[in-house]
Structure formats: C-alpha cells, structure tokens
Amino acid sequence: MPETPVPGARSATTRRQILARTGALGAGIVFSGALPELFADTAAAENLGHTGYGPLVPDPDGLLDLPEGFRYRVLSREGDPLRSGEGPVPSHHDGMTALPGPRGRVHLVRNHENRPTAPLAVPTVEGLTYDPAGKGGCTALTLDHRGEVLAERVAIAGTAVNCAGGPTPWHTWLTCEETEDRAGTNGYAKDHGFIFEVDPSDPYRTGAVPLTAMGRFQHEAIAVDPRRGVVYETEDAFEKPFGLFYRFLPEKPLGGTGSLRAGGRLQAMRVPGVADLSSIQETGAAFDGIEWVDVPDPLAAGTAIRFQDFGPRGITHAQKLEGCYWSGRSVYFVSSFARGADGSAADHYGQIWRYDPERRRLTLVIVFGPATDVQLPGESPDNICLAPGGGLMVCEDGNGAQHVFGVTRHGEVYAMARGRQNIGTAEEPEWGEFAGVTFSPDGRTMYVNCYTPGTTFAVTGPWRR
C-alpha cells in the first residue's frame, strides 16, 4: 500500500526491491531461514517441494496471466454499479478476506484504501457511515457455491485509507485505517486511525463503530489468537520513529461480534536490548522474555503512540511493519524493508518474525534479499497469505510488472499471476499492484485484487492440496 499521501503512488524511492525478476516466467529470491516455520510444523509443510505450476500464459483479454490449467473470473470492477444499487464500485481495492457463509456461500470483504483524492469513494449509507467526509471503507460480495456473485453492497463507509486488517474466529473482518488524521484535517469531521469490525452477513449488526481501545495509529494488519482472543496489530508508520508491534487484550475474548467493543488493554512489544528490529540480521536469532508494555495513551490524544514515553528502557520499533497472520501456535508479522537512509538501524529487504506467546519468544525466521540486481523491477511484498497446500502467496507492490508470487518451503519462488492492465501509456507502461490475496474456505479458489484499476479476480485451477 502507498506510504505517501499520493493515492496509488509506487515509487522506487519509497519501496525496497526484494523480488528481483528475470522475466515474466519466474523470479529470484534469496531466503535465509526455514520456510516450514511458516506452516506451523503441520503435514502441509511436506507438500511444498514443488516449484510452481509452470510458465505464465499470456491472457488474450489482457487482464491476468496465469499458468496453464488455471482460469480467472472478474467478480467486480471499479466504476461498475454495485449490485445493491448504492452507487459505483469504489476505487483502490486493497486488503480482503474470504469468510464462510451458509449453504456453501462465501463472503468476500474488501477494503478500499481511499484518501481524500480518491476518484470513487465508498458510497455513504445510513447506519453504515462513520464520517461522511471519509472516502474509504469496505464492500462485501456474497458468492454462491458455484462462485457466482449473488450480492455486492457497502459494508462500512466514511472511514479513511482502509489498508489491510484480518479475519476473526467468529467470521467477521477487522478493517484497519492507515492514517492518523484528526478531525479538521482533510475535511474530516471525526478523528481517524482506528479499527472497525465488519460483519459481511449483516453489516448493520456491526455498524460503523470505531474500536477505540485498540488504539489510534497508522494500522496495517491484525491477527487473532483463536485460543486466547488476543489481537496482534502492526503499525506501518511512514517516518522515524517507526512503527510498533502491538497486542490487544480484550475484556471479553472470543465473545463473537461486539466483544471487542467491551474494551481492553493495548500493549506494545519490547525486545530487551533491541531498539530496532532491523539491527537483527541472522535468521534463527531468538529472544526470550519478550515484554509487553501498556500504551500510555491508546487514543493518541496529544502524541502519536510511537512518540510516547515508554519509560527509561524505551520500546522496540521497526520500519514497514505490514502483514500479520496467525498460524499454529504463533503469530507471524512482516517488516517489508528497512533502510538506513530513512533512519533504520540497518538495511534489509524484508523479514518475517515469529512470536510464540507461550514461550514469550521472538524469532527471526525468514530474511528476504534480491538474487539479482536490485535495480530490476520487483519490489517489497505487501499482503501475504497461506495457500491451501501450505505454500506462501505474496502480493507484489512496486514499479514495473506486477505479480502474485508463490514461495515453496525450499525458498523457491514462482510466478503465480501477472497483471496485464496497463494504467500507463504504450511508451511508458505501468501496472497496478496486487493486494488482498486470500483463499476460499475450501481452498479451491484464490481471490486477489488489482489495486488500480480496482478489480477483484477469482482464480481456479489444479491447486495442490
């Protein structure tokens, strides 16, 4: 997602290269670490030895290249009428999840990372709008058991810069605002920078209520511990001091829709002796005795949280904290890159960290790095999800051609999809990034968004399970 106020901006000066491509048929990545870490030591990890599904076949319709045997369907496009009649499909398709519904149905909940200059806002709907000046929000699609679109509607409106988020164990979506703008800024009538809960089966049940106890900051993604109900949160701060890794301890854990409104405690992670995670470069580096420190002012009424006083021992920061997901008994989170020129302690091209709450242990499990010239197209990963067979799917976010990449447990990278929608010119082509990759509950369909022009695809084919 963009890290500047310019919607859709994807600049090499603001993104680090980590997926260095050699062409349309594949990519080179250097991985240090044990990929099975990402798959919770399950049997699925044993199925990851394949090197992909073959070369990408050019799409005669010029939308999406896929390997032979795979097909796509366009479920929704920016500017088309919403099936609810509430207005046009909004711009900037971003984070997304696929939740189970009755009778084999699937609910897709889709973020729209709209800033004030977005061309198509999420339509305001009475009872679902937080701040009429906010152009962001979520739309929800309902698919039948054959994958046909039955409904498409506004799920929440009047929010801002809805970047990523995450699903809950009770089948709702937590959508995250990646902004700290206050009322009076950019015409907003209310403060922004919150998490909102969205129930795609009945959006009016969750409404447009900010979960204020979960903090006001530049949210990126969340992951829920399904046993304890703890919610982990990443912060994608754009300048130093960089973001923090948080946990929220709800008063009513796992209580279903509405439980997070009961309040709780917001805490930030402190790694003893480590002020900046970028200073750690060796995979396998582990830290025991991780501490969690209460956030002095979760609403950031006077000072942004990352600037607040956490005591003489300080707090641990990291640049570009983005993806976050739960697997097995641990939470994993991603630092997309770090750059000393921006103020980080050291450079890296991407890290994946694992936190085990039972052991209070933090481990650096994966380090990304370019296998070829970093000036080639291909940039830092953004949204990440687990594939049905245990593999990793990565949405590319950068200049040049845009891909969804798969990663095997041996560190092999293969191109799963390539965007073909040229939003530039014939002389200087440009392609929109991918976002929101996710799989249907039965693992038979991959859903993914193109950010610009906003397009939601459903991809089916011979997925290895």
Image: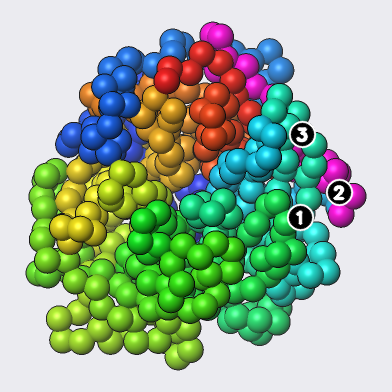
Magenta-tinted stretch: 65-86
Q: Residue at x 27, y 39 (%)?
A: 40
- Left/right placement of residue 1 relative to residue 377 reads right
Q: CA distance from mark 1 to mark 3?
A: 15 Å
Q: Disc 3 marks which residue? A: 149
Q: Position of residue 443 (x, y in %)?
A: 51, 28
Q: Position of residue 135 (x, y in %)?
A: 71, 64
Q: Position of residue 382 (x, y in %)?
A: 44, 45
Specify the label residue 84 is tagged with: 2
Earlier-in-chain disc, 1 versus 3: 3
CB of mark 1 within 8 Å of CB of mark 2? yes
Q: Residue furthest bottom?
A: 302
The picture quadrant where one finds residue 37 is top left
> Is residue 426 visible to the viewer in this orientation of the structure?
no
Q: Residue at x 85, y 43 (%)?
A: 83
Task: Give the amino acid at mark 3.
Answer: Val
CB of mark 3 within 8 Å of CB of mark 2? no
Q: Nearer the viewer, residue 456 or 145?
A: 145
The picture quadrant where one finds residue 46 is top left
Q: Is 427 located above or below residue 423 in the figure?
A: above
Q: CA distance from mark 3 to mark 2?
A: 12 Å
Earlier-in-chain disc, 3 versus 2: 2
The C terminus, quarter of image: top left
Q: Nearer the viewer, residue 373 or 288?
A: 288
Name the secondary structure under disc 1. Answer: strand
Task: Give the amino acid at mark 2.
Answer: Ser
Q: Is residue 71 shown in magenta?
A: yes
> Is residue 296 visible to the viewer in this orientation of the structure?
yes
The picture quadrant where one finds residue 390 is top left
Q: Residue at x 33, y 15 (%)?
A: 51
Q: Disc 1 marks which residue? A: 154
